Image (tube, helix red, strand yellow):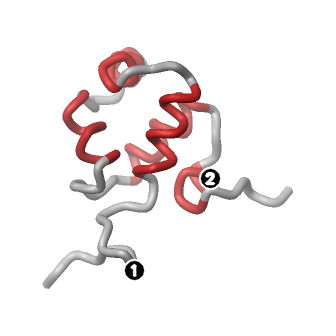
Amino acid sequence: MPKPRTSTGEKNLIGQRLTDLRNAHNLSQRDLAYKLQLAGYDIDKNVITRIETNKRYVTDIEIKAFSEIFTVSCDFLITGKEEEE
């Protein structure tokens, strides 16, 4: 059974937002991987590269990790919009 993709054929919804957040925080992919590993997440630079270039699916744990590092909601990573209060 084929895995789902976005309407434009991408494997994840967060790749571009992850790149934008990382650049806004002046972090290299290696720096981000280091921060994630210090926080207890086993995510290396190659995983970040593959997510940002839409060559890899993203797990819920990874979305949670990115949201914690960048202090944004999981919803923001997926949709680009903050949750309504």
Q: Quadrant of residue 29?
A: top left
The residue at which mark 2 appears reads as: 76
Mark on residue 41? none
Alpha-carbon distance for marks 1 and 2? 19 Å
Identify the secondary structure beneath mark 1: loop
- Residue 43 higher or lower than 5, as above or below: above
Q: Tell me which amino acid carries mark 1.
A: Ser
Q: Is residue 24 left or right of residue 42?
A: right
Query: How many numbered circles are shown?
Result: 2
**Residue 13, position as x, y percentages in the image:** 44, 61
**Residue 1, position as x, y percentages in the image:** 13, 84
Q: Nearer the viewer, mark 1 or mark 2?
A: 1
Front residue of 40/33: it is: 33
Report crowding for label 2: few under 14, some 14 to 19, many 20 or more residues within 10 A (C-alpha). Answer: some
Q: Is residue 83 left or right of residue 10?
A: right
Extreme-right residue of the structure: 85
Q: Residue at x 72, y 53 (%)?
A: 82
Front residue of 4/60: it is: 4
Q: Tell me which amino acid carries mark 2.
A: Phe
**Residue 39, position as x, y percentages in the image:** 42, 20
Q: Quadrant of residue 79?
A: bottom right
- Residue 61 higher or lower than 80, as above or below: above
Question: First in sequence: mark 1 or mark 2?
Answer: 1
Q: Residue at x 30, y 20 (%)?
A: 30
**Residue 25, position as x, y percentages in the image:** 56, 23
Q: Is residue 84 left or right of residue 23?
A: right
Report crowding for label 1: few under 14, some 14 to 19, many 20 or more residues within 10 A (C-alpha). Answer: few
Q: Residue at x 63, y 33 (%)?
A: 71
The residue at which mark 1 appears reads as: 7
- Residue 55 higher or lower than 22, as above or below: below
Front residue of 85/51: it is: 51
